[in-house]
Amino acid sequence: MSRSTTTKLPARLDLSAPQHIRARGRSSSIVKLDEVKDRGAEDALDRNAYLNINADWVNAKGAWLIHVVLIISGKVIIDTIPGMTQQISWTLVNLLYLALSYLMFHGVTGIPFGSDLHGGAYDDLTLWEQIDDGAQYTPAKKWLLCLPIGLFLASTHYTNYHPWFFAINLTALVIVLIPKLPQASPFDTIAPHPPQELDLITHLLLINPQFHRQRVRFMSEGTGSGFATPVSASFPPSGSTTPVLESSSPSFSRGPTTITEAHFK
Protein backbone atom coordinates (compact mmCIF):
# COMPACT_ATOMS: atom_id res chain seq x y z
CA MET A 1 0.00 0.00 0.00
CA SER A 2 1.47 3.27 -1.05
CA ARG A 3 0.83 6.57 0.57
CA SER A 4 1.24 10.03 -0.87
CA THR A 5 4.09 12.19 0.30
CA THR A 6 3.60 15.90 0.56
CA THR A 7 6.59 18.23 0.38
CA LYS A 8 6.14 21.70 1.75
CA LEU A 9 8.37 24.40 0.36
CA PRO A 10 9.72 27.04 2.74
CA ALA A 11 8.01 30.40 2.76
CA ARG A 12 11.19 32.20 1.76
CA LEU A 13 11.37 30.46 -1.63
CA ASP A 14 9.44 32.42 -4.26
CA LEU A 15 9.04 30.64 -7.61
CA SER A 16 6.13 32.71 -8.92
CA ALA A 17 8.10 35.18 -11.02
CA PRO A 18 11.26 34.00 -12.78
CA GLN A 19 14.05 36.51 -12.69
CA HIS A 20 15.61 37.85 -15.82
CA ILE A 21 19.13 36.56 -16.31
CA ARG A 22 21.63 38.70 -18.13
CA ALA A 23 24.94 37.42 -19.43
CA ARG A 24 28.28 39.05 -18.85
CA GLY A 25 30.01 39.23 -22.20
CA ARG A 26 33.67 38.59 -22.81
CA SER A 27 36.27 40.71 -24.50
CA SER A 28 36.95 39.94 -28.14
CA SER A 29 39.88 42.26 -28.70
CA ILE A 30 42.95 40.85 -30.44
CA VAL A 31 45.45 43.04 -28.59
CA LYS A 32 44.92 43.69 -24.88
CA LEU A 33 46.79 46.11 -22.61
CA ASP A 34 47.02 45.25 -18.92
CA GLU A 35 48.46 47.66 -16.37
CA VAL A 36 51.07 45.97 -14.20
CA LYS A 37 51.39 47.28 -10.66
CA ASP A 38 52.47 46.00 -7.29
CA ARG A 39 51.61 46.65 -3.68
CA GLY A 40 54.81 48.49 -2.85
CA ALA A 41 56.44 47.41 0.39
CA GLU A 42 54.37 44.22 0.73
CA ASP A 43 55.44 42.81 -2.63
CA ALA A 44 59.03 43.94 -2.09
CA LEU A 45 59.23 41.98 1.14
CA ASP A 46 57.46 38.93 -0.28
CA ARG A 47 59.74 38.75 -3.34
CA ASN A 48 62.88 38.85 -1.22
CA ALA A 49 61.66 36.33 1.35
CA TYR A 50 62.71 33.29 -0.74
CA LEU A 51 64.44 32.61 -4.03
CA ASN A 52 62.07 32.55 -7.00
CA ILE A 53 63.09 29.26 -8.57
CA ASN A 54 60.46 29.72 -11.28
CA ALA A 55 62.55 32.48 -12.93
CA ASP A 56 66.03 31.95 -11.51
CA TRP A 57 66.82 29.07 -13.89
CA VAL A 58 67.30 31.44 -16.86
CA ASN A 59 70.61 32.55 -15.34
CA ALA A 60 71.78 29.02 -14.56
CA LYS A 61 74.63 27.31 -16.38
CA GLY A 62 73.47 25.83 -19.69
CA ALA A 63 70.12 27.65 -19.67
CA TRP A 64 71.03 29.69 -22.73
CA LEU A 65 72.36 26.70 -24.65
CA ILE A 66 69.20 24.66 -24.16
CA HIS A 67 67.31 26.97 -26.54
CA VAL A 68 69.76 26.22 -29.36
CA VAL A 69 69.61 22.49 -28.60
CA LEU A 70 65.81 22.51 -28.75
CA ILE A 71 65.80 24.42 -32.04
CA ILE A 72 68.28 22.01 -33.65
CA SER A 73 66.40 18.98 -32.30
CA GLY A 74 63.13 20.31 -33.65
CA LYS A 75 64.71 20.94 -37.05
CA VAL A 76 66.03 17.38 -37.22
CA ILE A 77 62.67 15.89 -36.22
CA ILE A 78 60.71 17.97 -38.74
CA ASP A 79 63.15 17.08 -41.53
CA THR A 80 62.34 13.38 -41.02
CA ILE A 81 58.77 13.95 -42.22
CA PRO A 82 58.42 12.57 -45.78
CA GLY A 83 58.06 15.22 -48.47
CA MET A 84 59.21 18.04 -46.20
CA THR A 85 60.96 20.91 -47.98
CA GLN A 86 63.53 23.24 -46.44
CA GLN A 87 61.27 26.26 -46.81
CA ILE A 88 58.40 24.67 -44.89
CA SER A 89 60.79 23.05 -42.41
CA TRP A 90 62.47 26.31 -41.37
CA THR A 91 59.12 28.09 -41.22
CA LEU A 92 57.65 25.41 -38.94
CA VAL A 93 60.71 25.49 -36.67
CA ASN A 94 60.47 29.25 -36.39
CA LEU A 95 56.72 29.26 -35.73
CA LEU A 96 56.88 26.44 -33.18
CA TYR A 97 59.69 28.06 -31.22
CA LEU A 98 58.00 31.46 -31.22
CA ALA A 99 54.66 29.97 -30.17
CA LEU A 100 56.18 28.02 -27.29
CA SER A 101 58.30 31.01 -26.29
CA TYR A 102 55.27 33.30 -26.21
CA LEU A 103 53.22 30.82 -24.19
CA MET A 104 56.01 30.21 -21.70
CA PHE A 105 57.25 33.75 -21.11
CA HIS A 106 54.12 35.85 -21.75
CA GLY A 107 51.03 33.64 -21.76
CA VAL A 108 51.04 32.30 -18.19
CA THR A 109 51.11 34.31 -14.96
CA GLY A 110 52.14 33.31 -11.47
CA ILE A 111 54.39 30.48 -10.34
CA PRO A 112 53.42 26.79 -10.47
CA PHE A 113 54.82 25.89 -7.05
CA GLY A 114 55.64 27.62 -3.79
CA SER A 115 53.35 30.58 -4.40
CA ASP A 116 52.48 30.74 -0.69
CA LEU A 117 56.14 31.37 0.15
CA HIS A 118 56.01 34.73 -1.64
CA GLY A 119 52.60 35.82 -0.39
CA GLY A 120 51.13 35.98 -3.90
CA ALA A 121 53.60 38.65 -5.06
CA TYR A 122 54.09 36.85 -8.40
CA ASP A 123 50.49 35.83 -9.05
CA ASP A 124 49.84 38.62 -11.57
CA LEU A 125 53.29 38.60 -13.20
CA THR A 126 54.36 36.64 -16.26
CA LEU A 127 57.63 34.72 -16.36
CA TRP A 128 59.22 37.52 -18.40
CA GLU A 129 58.30 40.04 -15.70
CA GLN A 130 59.69 37.76 -12.99
CA ILE A 131 63.11 37.32 -14.60
CA ASP A 132 65.79 39.42 -12.87
CA ASP A 133 63.12 41.00 -10.63
CA GLY A 134 61.54 42.75 -13.62
CA ALA A 135 64.69 44.63 -14.67
CA GLN A 136 64.97 45.34 -18.40
CA TYR A 137 67.92 44.71 -20.74
CA THR A 138 69.72 42.25 -18.47
CA PRO A 139 72.04 39.68 -20.13
CA ALA A 140 69.40 36.94 -19.90
CA LYS A 141 66.69 39.13 -21.42
CA LYS A 142 69.02 40.35 -24.15
CA TRP A 143 69.69 36.73 -25.10
CA LEU A 144 65.99 35.87 -25.10
CA LEU A 145 65.37 38.97 -27.23
CA CYS A 146 68.11 38.32 -29.79
CA LEU A 147 67.51 34.59 -30.21
CA PRO A 148 64.11 34.92 -31.97
CA ILE A 149 65.60 37.59 -34.23
CA GLY A 150 68.48 35.29 -35.17
CA LEU A 151 66.11 32.41 -35.86
CA PHE A 152 63.96 34.69 -38.02
CA LEU A 153 67.00 35.74 -40.07
CA ALA A 154 68.03 32.10 -40.53
CA SER A 155 64.54 31.05 -41.59
CA THR A 156 64.33 33.99 -43.99
CA HIS A 157 67.65 33.01 -45.58
CA TYR A 158 66.83 29.32 -45.98
CA THR A 159 63.37 30.07 -47.40
CA ASN A 160 65.13 32.00 -50.19
CA TYR A 161 63.43 35.24 -49.13
CA HIS A 162 60.06 33.99 -50.32
CA PRO A 163 57.55 36.82 -49.76
CA TRP A 164 54.84 34.63 -48.24
CA PHE A 165 57.17 32.82 -45.85
CA PHE A 166 58.82 36.13 -45.00
CA ALA A 167 55.45 37.71 -44.12
CA ILE A 168 54.45 34.76 -41.93
CA ASN A 169 57.76 34.66 -40.07
CA LEU A 170 57.87 38.43 -39.63
CA THR A 171 54.34 38.55 -38.22
CA ALA A 172 55.13 35.83 -35.70
CA LEU A 173 58.35 37.61 -34.71
CA VAL A 174 56.58 40.92 -34.09
CA ILE A 175 53.94 39.23 -31.93
CA VAL A 176 56.66 37.69 -29.73
CA LEU A 177 58.91 40.76 -29.55
CA ILE A 178 56.30 43.36 -28.59
CA PRO A 179 55.57 41.88 -25.11
CA LYS A 180 59.33 41.80 -24.43
CA LEU A 181 59.73 45.55 -24.90
CA PRO A 182 59.22 47.84 -21.88
CA GLN A 183 56.00 49.79 -22.30
CA ALA A 184 57.03 52.29 -19.63
CA SER A 185 60.17 52.72 -17.58
CA PRO A 186 59.92 51.33 -14.05
CA PHE A 187 60.55 54.10 -11.55
CA ASP A 188 63.25 52.25 -9.61
CA THR A 189 66.46 53.52 -8.05
CA ILE A 190 69.59 51.46 -7.57
CA ALA A 191 71.05 51.62 -4.07
CA PRO A 192 73.89 49.08 -3.74
CA HIS A 193 74.82 50.21 -0.22
CA PRO A 194 71.84 51.36 1.87
CA PRO A 195 72.51 54.30 4.18
CA GLN A 196 72.33 53.76 7.91
CA GLU A 197 69.17 55.82 8.32
CA LEU A 198 67.15 53.73 5.84
CA ASP A 199 65.10 50.89 7.23
CA LEU A 200 64.65 47.51 5.56
CA ILE A 201 61.40 48.36 3.79
CA THR A 202 62.82 51.54 2.29
CA HIS A 203 65.90 49.68 1.10
CA LEU A 204 63.80 46.98 -0.58
CA LEU A 205 61.73 49.62 -2.33
CA LEU A 206 64.90 51.25 -3.63
CA ILE A 207 66.61 48.15 -4.98
CA ASN A 208 63.49 46.52 -6.46
CA PRO A 209 61.74 47.77 -9.59
CA GLN A 210 58.22 49.05 -9.13
CA PHE A 211 55.98 47.59 -11.82
CA HIS A 212 53.86 50.30 -13.38
CA ARG A 213 53.69 49.71 -17.10
CA GLN A 214 51.47 48.24 -19.79
CA ARG A 215 51.51 44.53 -20.60
CA VAL A 216 50.69 43.64 -24.21
CA ARG A 217 48.82 40.40 -24.89
CA PHE A 218 47.49 38.94 -28.11
CA MET A 219 44.26 36.95 -28.40
CA SER A 220 43.46 37.47 -24.71
CA GLU A 221 40.00 36.67 -23.43
CA GLY A 222 38.18 38.81 -20.91
CA THR A 223 37.01 35.86 -18.81
CA GLY A 224 38.62 32.63 -17.83
CA SER A 225 36.19 30.39 -19.74
CA GLY A 226 34.82 30.67 -23.22
CA PHE A 227 31.22 30.95 -22.08
CA ALA A 228 29.35 33.90 -20.68
CA THR A 229 28.78 33.78 -16.94
CA PRO A 230 25.09 34.13 -15.95
CA VAL A 231 24.47 37.07 -13.65
CA SER A 232 21.25 37.61 -11.72
CA ALA A 233 20.10 38.99 -8.39
CA SER A 234 20.54 35.59 -6.74
CA PHE A 235 23.75 34.76 -8.66
CA PRO A 236 25.96 37.85 -8.68
CA PRO A 237 29.37 38.18 -10.34
CA SER A 238 32.36 36.84 -8.47
CA GLY A 239 33.82 39.24 -5.96
CA SER A 240 30.51 40.69 -4.84
CA THR A 241 28.78 40.16 -1.53
CA THR A 242 26.18 37.51 -0.83
CA PRO A 243 22.76 38.72 -2.01
CA VAL A 244 20.00 39.30 0.50
CA LEU A 245 16.68 37.84 -0.56
CA GLU A 246 13.87 40.31 -0.25
CA SER A 247 10.23 39.97 -1.20
CA SER A 248 7.11 42.07 -1.02
CA SER A 249 4.86 39.00 -0.80
CA PRO A 250 2.68 38.72 2.34
CA SER A 251 3.85 35.13 2.79
CA PHE A 252 7.40 36.37 3.20
CA SER A 253 8.14 36.52 6.91
CA ARG A 254 11.27 37.91 8.43
CA GLY A 255 12.94 36.34 11.45
CA PRO A 256 12.85 37.86 14.91
CA THR A 257 15.00 40.90 15.35
CA THR A 258 15.47 40.33 19.10
CA ILE A 259 16.23 36.90 20.56
CA THR A 260 15.11 36.25 24.13
CA GLU A 261 14.93 33.20 26.37
CA ALA A 262 11.39 32.55 25.17
CA HIS A 263 12.72 31.41 21.77
CA PHE A 264 14.59 28.50 23.38
CA LYS A 265 11.59 27.11 25.29
Image (cartoon, grey):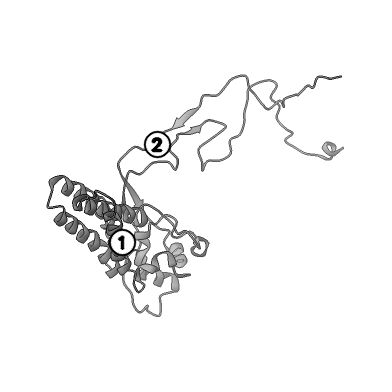
The percent coordinates of residue 112 (x first, y second) are 47, 58
Can residue 178 be seen here? The reply is: no
Q: Residue at x 43, y 38 (%)?
A: 226
Quarter occupied by residue 183: bottom left
- Front label number (2 vs 1): 1
Q: Residue at x 36, y 69 (%)?
A: 206
Q: Which residue is mark 1?
A: 73
Circle 1: element type: helix
Callouts 2 and 1 close, C-beta under 8 Å: no
Can residue 227 be seen here? The reply is: yes
The percent coordinates of residue 144 (x first, y second) are 28, 63
- The amino acid marked with disc number 1 is Ser
The percent coordinates of residue 236 (x first, y second) are 53, 35
Going from the N terminus, do you reach mark 2 or mark 1 first? 2
Quarter occupied by residue 61: bottom left
Circle 2: element type: loop
Q: Residues within 10 Å of mark 1 (few under 14, many from 20)?
A: few
Closer to us: 141 or 119? 141
- The amino acid marked with disc number 2 is Arg
Q: Tell me if residue 52 comes above or below residue 246 in the rendering.
A: below
Q: Which residue is mark 2?
A: 26
Q: Residue at x 26, y 66 (%)?
A: 143
The percent coordinates of residue 1 (x first, y second) are 87, 19
Q: Residues within 10 Å of mark 2 (few under 14, many from 20)?
A: some
Q: Which label number is shown at residue 221?
A: none
Q: Tell me if residue 120 comes above or below residue 193 in the rendering.
A: above
Q: Tell me if residue 155 comes above or below residue 234 in the rendering.
A: below
Task: Look at the image and tell me in which quarter the C terminus lies.
Answer: top right
**Left or right of 110, for residue 265:** right
